[in-house]
Image (tube, rainbow, N blue to C red):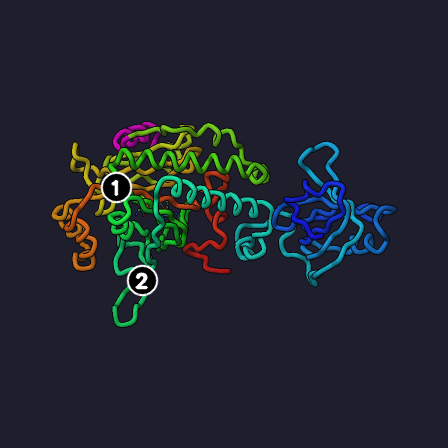
């Protein structure tokens, strides 16, 4: 019977077959320790002269890294670890033996080599672990929204206008209609849907022609946007709950993966609502005290986010940025018209921005004026302005970057490892 490695605990002292790949091998002649992987986990299979038939010993000797195979034997519990299982090999059937040596070996490889071989690198244990954590984050996000009355609305990817400013747009020719753009965020469409359902979210790929080569930027990434009939305060509360729910789920489900990633989980365990809240003005002062040359009317730079978030062990909401550096659709702070009623959520340990959100401008005339100030074409935003013309309602929302959150929770150095096939300014392959 073929079993999955993750299910081995239910087959102790039984004979079973694992179908998978030879991940690693130690030993020679008299005894081989084969590390098998089958997608669900890793397991050691022991082939030992005397116990294992000679033909299987010979096959074990010939096995190479990433040979695909079926290995049969008795499942046993590790003598010292309750949750570790092994197999005592009685038979090995090779499915496919690579003709050439597997390109990714145990030795250190540079990032370019690994990225060129991303189609194979995905099999390595750390990369395996990251994708599983990412999967948990996606599922936890869906759980949270399903438990809290949100409806999933799928926003379009081909759009006639910009959402987040026009400098980072991918433009394509769209038949006789002129230019179309790849979506930077589904937010504007969710603002239409929230007037139908009250609480909505989307989740999909978005695109930014980012010229920046940093450890935080991709040109294609996955964003979850949420939109609610609520004010700025409640917007932040929902973000806190969502992030706490995600962390809890990963800590519950992915212990093994976090161990493989050598992630210190203490900082994750400590995450607790309410998160730290600071205004942009406070943060500017604090950063200048730490040696940054940030100006009061500037956005936070990547380095600013790093030094600020290394100082705290909780996520930080940075609220009320200068309206000048933020998008046209943000409502202004009623107490200070030069500020937006917005917040970015910065993850601790130097990770920086994971969420951008705001209350939206809900007044027709004010929004029209903003569109003109930002030199956007009111014609393409007619439908968006209609939302303020027919029963306008205060609403707020936010968007998270899935890869940013995955990178933080996994403790990766660079965002490129958090997405199966990263697209960056200098990389489109494989
Ligand atoms: O802060 P941003 O630009 O916000 C929006 O797009 C809003 N329309 C969202 C909303 O209110 N519904 O992007 C949201 C998040 C950022 O906080 C960051 O986590 C991620 O998307 N992000 C990127 N991730 C990877 N590579 C990039 N180039 C990213 N740009 C933004
Ligand atoms: Mg942002």
| The furthest residue to the bottom | 176
For the image shown, how many numbered marks are present on the structure?
Answer: 2
| Left or right: residue 401 compared with residue 338 | right
Secondary structure, mark 1, is: loop
Q: Is residue 258 above or below residue 163?
A: above
Please provide percent x and percent y for residue 106: 65, 48
Identify the mark nearer the N-term, 2 or 1.
2
Nearer to me, 14 or 182: 14
| Left or right: residue 421 compared with residue 291 | right
Residue underneath mark 1: 229
Nearer to me, 285 or 97: 97
Please provide percent x and percent y for residue 357: 30, 41
Looking at the rendering, the stretch of residues picked out in magenta corresponds to 279-292
Please provide percent x and percent y for residue 117: 56, 57
| The furthest residue to the right | 50
| Left or right: residue 188 compared with residue 302 | left
Residue underneath mark 2: 171
Instruction: Using the rendered view, name the quadrant where residue 360 is placed.
Output: top left
2 or 1: mark nearer the eye: 1
Nearer to me, 215 or 25: 25
Q: Is residue 94 above or below residue 78?
A: below
Instruction: Using the rendered view, name the quadrant where residue 231 is placed.
Output: top left
- Beta carbon at label 1 within 8 Å of ligand 1: no
At x 50% / y 53%, what residue is drawn?
420
Please provide percent x and percent y for residue 142: 42, 45
Label annotation for residue 33: none
- Beta carbon at label 2 within 8 Å of ligand 1: no
C-alpha separation, residue under disc 2 versus residue under disc 1? 32 Å
Magenta stretch: helix, strand or loop mostly: helix
């Amino acid at each position: 019977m073929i079993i999955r490695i993750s299910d081995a605990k239910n087959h102790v002292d039984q004979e079973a077959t694992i179908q998978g790949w030879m991940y690693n091998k130690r030993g020679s002649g008299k005894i081989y320790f084969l590390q098998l992987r089958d997608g669900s986990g890793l397991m050691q299979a022991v082939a030992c002269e005397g116990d294992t038939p000679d033909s299987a010993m010979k096959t074990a000797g010939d096995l190479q890294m990433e040979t695909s195979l079926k290995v049969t034997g008795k499942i046993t519990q590790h003598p010292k670890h309750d949750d570790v299982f092994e197999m005592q090999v009685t038979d090995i059937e090779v499915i496919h033996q690579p003709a050439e040596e597997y390109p990714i070996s145990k030795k250190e490889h540079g990032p370019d080599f690994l990225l060129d071989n991303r189609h194979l690198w995905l099999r390595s244990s750390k990369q395996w672990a990251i994708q599983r954590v990412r999967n948990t984050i996606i599922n936890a996000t869906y759980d949270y929204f399903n438990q809290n009355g949100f409806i999933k609305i799928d926003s379009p990817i081909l759009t006639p206008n910009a959402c987040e400013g026009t400098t980072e747009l991918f433009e394509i020719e769209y038949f006789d209609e002129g230019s179309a753009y790849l979506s930077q965020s589904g937010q504007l469409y969710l603002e239409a849907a929230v007037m139908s359902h009250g609480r909505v979210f989307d989740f999909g790929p978005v695109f930014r022609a980012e010229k920046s080569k940093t450890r935080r930027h991709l040109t294609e990434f996955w964003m979850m946007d949420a939109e609610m009939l609520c004010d700025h305060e409640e917007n932040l509360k929902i973000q806190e709950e969502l992030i706490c729910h995600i962390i809890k789920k990963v800590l519950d489900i992915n212990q093994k993966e976090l161990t493989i990633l050598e992630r210190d989980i203490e900082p994750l365990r400590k995450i607790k609502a309410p998160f730290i809240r600071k205004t942009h003005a406070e943060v500017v002062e604090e950063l200048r005290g730490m040696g940054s040359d940030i100006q009061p009317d500037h956005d936070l730079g990547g380095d600013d986010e790093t030094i600020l978030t290394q100082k705290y062990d909780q996520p930080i909401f940075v609220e009320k940025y200068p309206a000048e550096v933020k998008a046209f659709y943000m409502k202004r702070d009623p107490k200070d018209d030069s500020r937006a009623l917005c917040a970015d959520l910065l993850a601790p340990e130097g990770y920086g921005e994971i969420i951008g959100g705001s209350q939206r401008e809900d007044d027709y005339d004010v929004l029209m004026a903003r569109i003109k100030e930002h030199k956007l074409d009111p014609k393409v935003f007619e439908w968006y302005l209609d939302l303020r013309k027919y029963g306008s309602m205060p609403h707020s929302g936010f968007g998270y970057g899935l890869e940013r959150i995955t990178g933080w929770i996994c403790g990766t150095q660079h965002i490129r490892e958090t997405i199966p096939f990263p697209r960056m300014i200098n990389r489109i392959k494989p």
